[in-house]
Amino acid sequence: PDTRTQPPETGAERLLLDGFLDFHRETLRWKCAGLTDEQLATRSVPTSALALLGLLRHITEVERWWFLPFAGEVEPAPIYFSEAKINDDFDALDTVPPADVLARWDAEVDRVRAVAASTDLDAEFTRRDKQFSLRWVYLHMIEEYARHNGHADLLREAIDGVTGE
């Protein structure tokens, strides 16, 4: 069943940004719910390396990459890939058990929520000679999740036929 919390339709900017980002986080969790470890790692589109587990690993990295600079970690160390193996968040799915991937994602989301809650939307950081505000990071993360949730829709349908927005 769909247990996602719908984002608010009115309210302060921060409430709306948090609501939409959390909705997209919950959507990815919903797309992964009830699957076996093998199903989560299934690359169900033959021409692609995408799997739901890879999306979870990737989005964990992306959460850290964009929010942790506001906690002083301008370029957080990667968890699932390396400089030598840049695509291992998608390619090396057998290196960390899915339950551990989900637990790490949860922990990182909790961490970035705390960082974001204590940071002004106009706060900025510089990475590689570019300025980014927390407001921009929220909007980018909503876009990132929305795009990957579209991938998750197709992957889940190919795995077991389950569909839903």
Image: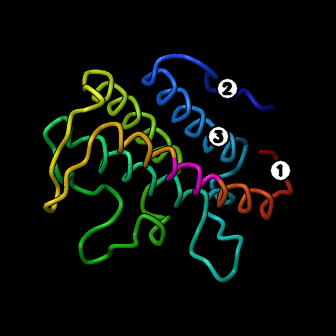
Question: Along the horizontal axis of the image, is 44 left or right of 11?
Answer: right
The Cα–Cα distance between marks 2 and 1, rounded to whole angstroms, is 18 Å
Please name the residue shown 30% across and 30% down the image: 121
Which residue in the structure is indicated by mark 2? 6
Which residue in the structure is indicated by mark 1? 163
Indicate the secondary structure of the residue bearing disc 2. Answer: loop
Locate residue 134, reporting x and y percent. Answer: 30, 37
Q: Earlier in the sequence, mark 2 or mark 1?
A: 2
CB under 8 Å between discs 3 and 2: no
- Quadrant in the picture for residue 33: top right
Q: Residues within 10 Å of mark 3 (few under 14, many from 20)?
A: many
Tag 3: residue type?
A: Thr
The Cα–Cα distance between marks 3 and 1, rounded to whole angstroms, is 12 Å
Rendered position, 57 above or below 164 = below
Q: Residues within 10 Å of mark 2 (few under 14, many from 20)?
A: few
Which residue in the structure is indicated by mark 3? 27
Residue 44 circle label: none
Q: Earlier in the sequence, mark 3 or mark 2?
A: 2
- Quadrant in the picture for residue 137: top left
Locate residue 17, reporting x and y percent. Answer: 48, 30
Q: Main secondary structure of the magenta part?
A: helix
Q: Which residues are magenta?
A: 143-149
